[in-house]
């Protein structure tokens, strides 16, 4: 871990009462990075975010931001912004006053304040809504107000709680673009929390996959998507066929099953292998499966097979010949197409 | 079939008659030209309405009642708002006990509380009657204050406080800047409800009177025992219209019924 990282979580332990939620978390974030904390609910990602914001006390360890230990610094003195999942706009204040709220507390007044608030609203395209109340705006507009309200404070780190999950598909793309633009324009370090792998993959520079309060894997979206280190990460990013390895064979409920080809040199130490449905070879190979279900998915067709290996999910081009339910079909899980897992948990 | 269609309107009419009938009789009686409280009224005059304002004891007890209603409700809110906030935002040990204690004055009959206060506080401790009345009315109004304010706190998401803190506000500052303005309607509603409850309270105040210290409803009862003229009816009408006016204004401007 580099000592010069912009934000460092050093053996940070978080607890609710005596129940430790996040033990000794180590994370280093560089200035201007866009980090996703990804994991299922209860994995500690939101807890971690709240601790960085100062809303949850750190039990032990340190949080260092921009060279300053902020572990014991109060939330209102941290220069950390948070965009809440619910946006948390102040309902009694106008859009203008919502954005001005933090600036007024800083003692900013008059034309300086006005210029800053107007600029903030303009940057999110809401200048004409300054006098509206939050309830008079759509969800997407409210979120942009929340973004402007955080950004005018020029935070060192902006935290975002599930920034895209309340939006419909079209607004999702808008907001994603918006966040990337803000990040590029201001160079602010962003950390967002999500349970949606697609959201993390599309937005983040680096993804931190969390499980039960621990970091499972840190990597670029490509790393996480193509090279998951564990069965948990593989499952989370859509590898549906995951097997532990024992003595070079797949361990299934029906015993050890040899692979069709020897393991490559890169994977002798692998604890398991994982295949996406797209990586399953259908129509040839040493294994036999019975088609239990099939569904058309546009460009592709998905199959659910019952086999000696257990349940196999396969996905092939829709132009391939269709295998009817109940028929037997040959398939293969080729070792060199699989993602080797270094941990099987 | 006809019996069934008539049933509901008839019941409705009876209920309304029982609820509003006495009130109409009192109002009619207060415009009487006669010397005694009677219905139907004898003739029409406004003399009893005017007389109300000339009775010294009414003026004094009206002042007492106003002081109790305004002061007691304000005190109940000063206690009740922080209590509601703590109950709704934190999981406190003994929260259920606090809730029960706070709502006790609704459950325990006022006359028992009044007698107990007289017997065990006023007499042995020689406490000031005004002070005891004030405390009793504060306790009386507290359950309403907590209930109404809690209802409006429940409607307010707690993350706006965290948002305020992250924008640089202190916890206390966040309460005054974003919580209080958003529960203003609930607080005003609680105030009106408390005011009306306190002002119209008889049983609690019945035993708690001293020379020159009496609430208006108790004073009216005492007055009627001596003088049986329509001025009490006139005063009742005036008070009833005052209450109705307050409640209508509250409903009109604040959406009062949302909080009760």
Image: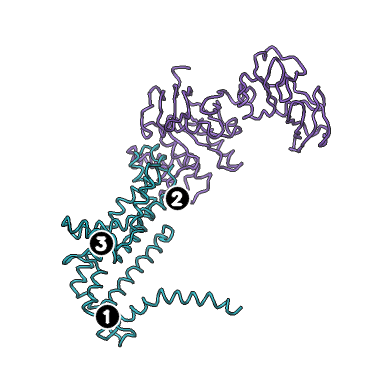
Residue A154 visible here? no
**Residue at the (63%, 26%) spot, across then down:** A234
Looking at the picture, tell me which residue is in the foreground, A154 or A331: A331
Q: Are marks 2 and 3 in contact (CB under 8 Å)?
A: no
Element carrying mark 1? loop
The colour chain B appears in is cyan
Quarter of the view holding residue A112: top left
B35 or A97: nearer the viewer: B35
Helix, strand or loop at label 3? It is: helix
Badge 1 sits on which subunit?
B
Q: Which chain letter matches label 2?
A: A
Q: Earlier in the sequence, mark 3 or mark 1?
A: 3
Residue A240, x across and y down, in percent? 68, 29
Q: Which mark is residue A133?
A: 2
Left or right: where does residue B150 sit relative to residue A279? left
In the displayed structure image, the side of residue B45 where residue A198 appears, left or right: right
Say which of marks 1 and 2 sits in front: 1
Q: How many residues crowd around disc 3 within 10 Å: few (fewer than 14), some, or many (20 or more)?
A: some
Where is residue B74 shown, x and y percent of the image?
A: 28, 55
Give the image's coloring scheme: by chain
Mark 3 lies on residue: B115
Q: Which mark is residue A233?
A: none
For label 1, the residue is B230
Q: Colour of chain A?
A: purple
Name of the residue lying farthest toward the top: A265
Residue shown at 82%/24% (left/top)?
A284
Q: Nearer the viewer, mark 3 or mark 1?
A: 3
């Amino acid at each position: 871990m580099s000592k010069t990282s912009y934000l460092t979580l050093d053996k940070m332990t978080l607890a609710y009462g005596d129940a430790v939620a996040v033990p000794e978390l180590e994370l280093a974030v560089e200035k201007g990075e866009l980090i996703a904390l990804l994991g299922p609910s209860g994995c500690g990602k939101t807890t971690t975010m709240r601790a960085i914001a100062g809303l949850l006390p750190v039990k032990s360890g340190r949080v260092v931001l921009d060279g300053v230990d902020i572990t014991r610094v109060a939330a209102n003195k941290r220069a950390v912004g948070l965009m809440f999942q619910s946006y948390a706009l102040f309902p009694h204040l106008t859009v203008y006053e919502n954005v001005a709220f933090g600036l007024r507390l800083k003692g900013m007044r008059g034309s300086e304040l006005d210029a800053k608030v107007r600029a903030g609203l303009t940057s999110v395209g809401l200048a004409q809504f300054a006098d509206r109340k939050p309830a008079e705006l759509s969800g997407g507009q409210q979120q942009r107000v929340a973004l402007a309200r955080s950004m005018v404070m020029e935070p060192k780190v902006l935290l975002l709680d599930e920034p895209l999950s309340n939006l419909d598909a079209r607004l999702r793309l808008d907001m994603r673009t918006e966040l990337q633009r803000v990040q590029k324009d201001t160079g602010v370090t962003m950390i967002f929390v999500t349970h949606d792998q697609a959201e993390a993959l599309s937005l983040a520079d680096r993804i931190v996959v969390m499980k039960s309060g621990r970091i499972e894997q840190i990597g670029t979206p490509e790393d996480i998507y193509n090279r998951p280190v564990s069965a948990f990460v593989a499952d989370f990013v859509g590898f549906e066929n995951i097997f532990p390895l024992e003595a070079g064979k797949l361990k299934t409920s029906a015993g050890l099953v040899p692979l069709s080809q020897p393991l490559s040199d890169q994977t002798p130490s692998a604890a398991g292998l994982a295949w996406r449905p797209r990586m399953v070879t259908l129509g040839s190979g040493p294994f036999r499966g019975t088609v239990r279900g099939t569904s058309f998915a546009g460009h592709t067709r998905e199959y659910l097979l019952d086999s000696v290996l257990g349940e196999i999910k396969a996905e092939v081009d829709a132009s391939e010949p269709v295998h009817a339910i109940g028929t037997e079909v040959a398939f293969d899980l080729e070792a060199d197409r699989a993602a080797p897992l270094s941990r099987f948990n | 079939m006809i019996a069934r269609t008539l049933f509901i309107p008839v019941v409705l009419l009876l209920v309304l008659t029982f609820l509003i009938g006495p009130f109409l009789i009192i109002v009619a009686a207060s415009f009487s030209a006669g010397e005694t409280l009677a219905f139907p009224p004898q003739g029409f005059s406004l003399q009893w309405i005017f007389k109300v304002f000339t009775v010294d004891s009414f003026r004094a007890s009206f002042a007492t009642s106003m002081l109790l209603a305004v002061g007691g409700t304000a005190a109940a809110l000063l206690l009740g708002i922080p209590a509601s906030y703590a109950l709704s935002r934190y999981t406190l040990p003994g929260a259920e006990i606090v809730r029960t204690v706070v709502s006790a004055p609704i459950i325990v009959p006022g006359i028992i509380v009044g007698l107990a206060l007289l017997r065990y506080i006023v007499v042995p401790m020689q406490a000031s009657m005004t002070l005891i009345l004030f405390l009793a009315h504060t306790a009386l109004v507290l359950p309403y204050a907590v209930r109404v304010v809690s209802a409006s706190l429940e409607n307010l998401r707690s993350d706006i406080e965290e948002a305020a803190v992250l924008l640089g506000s202190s916890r206390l500052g966040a309460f005054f800047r974003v919580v209080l303005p958003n529960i203003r309607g609930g607080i005003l509603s609680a105030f009106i409800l408390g005011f009306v409850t306190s002002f119209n309270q008889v049983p609690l105040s019945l035993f708690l009177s001293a020379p020159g210290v009496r609430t208006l409803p108790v004073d009216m009862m005492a007055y009627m025992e001596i003088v049986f003229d329509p001025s009490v009816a006139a005063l009742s009408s005036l008070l009833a219209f005052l209450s109705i006016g307050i409640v209508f204004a509250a409903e009109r401007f604040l959406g009062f019924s949302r909080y009760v």
